[in-house]
Amino acid sequence: MYNFYVFIITLFFSLFLTILITKKIIPVLAKNKMGQRILADGPNWHKEKEGTPTMGGVSFVLATIACFFIFCIFLKSDTKEIVILLNVLAYSILNALIGIIDDFAKIRNRRNEGLSAKSKFFLQSIAAILFLISLRITVNINTELYIPFVNVKYDIGIFYYILAYFLLCGFVNAVNLTDGLDGLASSVVLSIGLFFAFVSLSLINNAVLSFISAVLIGGTIGFLRFNLHPAKIFMGDTGSLFLGSMVVSISFVINNILLVLVYGFVFLCEALSDILQVVYFKITNGKRIFKMAPIHHHFEKNGWSEIKIVIIFMLVNFAFCLLSYFGIGTI
């Protein structure tokens, strides 16, 4: 019953605060000309989005921080739960700060390029390494790798941390790549939040999971009110890097880091499509696998509307979330 209270209270405040903050910051961002720049080589119909306020992700970042304090003050959580959640939140905020720096650079430079790819990945690497070190020190995570669906564990030693590092950096950037259509990243994250809400309330007795699923649902629904096509605001790297961190962190909360490859299926496909496109382009001297990458742009080029892509991608990801139910194991 306790987890249910955690979920309901957190969901209410996350939803309410995200809507309130987003509504307040849209005119502020617009007044200060903090608008999105559109890539010249992107779909030409996206040029009409030029100038739409960005950095809107700060709304659900602030809402999540506020909910964390409510979680600590008013809810009866033990020290270990608070420490785990603090690790997740600190890691996510670090990535949000990287996103803020990147978004400000884009606005200052008046183009859709902020930090260089190397600089951004370097900062993300530091955040990931600090997260893993902190988990090791504070909650003593071990190096046993759980294999979903076959219910076996292998102690892989130092390779656990290497794998964990690549999953952390990979999925943070995968969510960032997915944030290319109105409401797409938020909707896919919503499917993950809904799934883990069900898991936390029916299968795994874990207040941290209840909290994370609640802020993901409340934050994304609240933001989608302004971000669905035609979007009044974009989350920017501030939001996408934060959500990516939260999504991949769930796998550490449930001690099943490989499961993110299943419940984050759409994000995985987005990242792989981009990698395959770049590699194939280079080795074939200009040929392409997809009409445009990441893959959501390929479907756009094939005539799919943004709304159709968002709905189908969300449903596909939710189907893979349901599949991951059979690979969760036990904490």
Image (cartoon, rainbow, N blue to C red):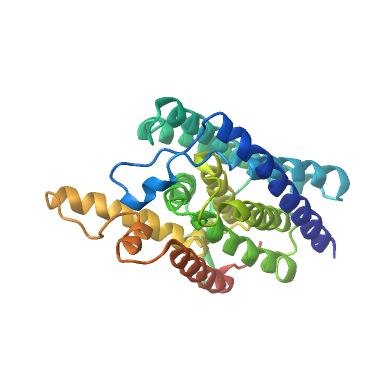
* Residue appearing at x 45%, y 25% in the figure: 108
Q: Horizontal and vertical percent for residue 305?
A: 41, 64
Residue drawn 15% across the image and 55% down it: 287
Asked whether, in this view, residue 277 is left or right of residue 85, the answer is: left
Q: Left or right of 53: which side holds 277?
A: left
Residue at image point 84% right, 61% down: 2
Total number of numbered discs in the rendering: 0
Q: Position of residue 275 (x, y in %)?
A: 30, 51
The picture quadrant where one finds residue 28 is top right
Residue 326 visible from this viewpoint: yes
Q: Position of residue 179 (x, y in %)?
A: 46, 50
Q: Is residue 11 left or right of residue 268?
A: right
| Pick the front one: 273 or 30 | 30
Picture coordinates of residue 203, whole percent (x, y): 70, 70
Which quarter of the figure is the C terminus placed in? Answer: bottom right
Q: Does residue 136 appear anywhere in the picture?
A: no
**Residue at 54% of width from left, 52% of height from top?**
248
Q: From the viewer's side, name the closer residue of 293 and 260.
A: 293
Rendered view: 302 above or below 39? below
Residue nearest the viewer, comparing 81 with 152: 81
In front: 295, or 282?
295
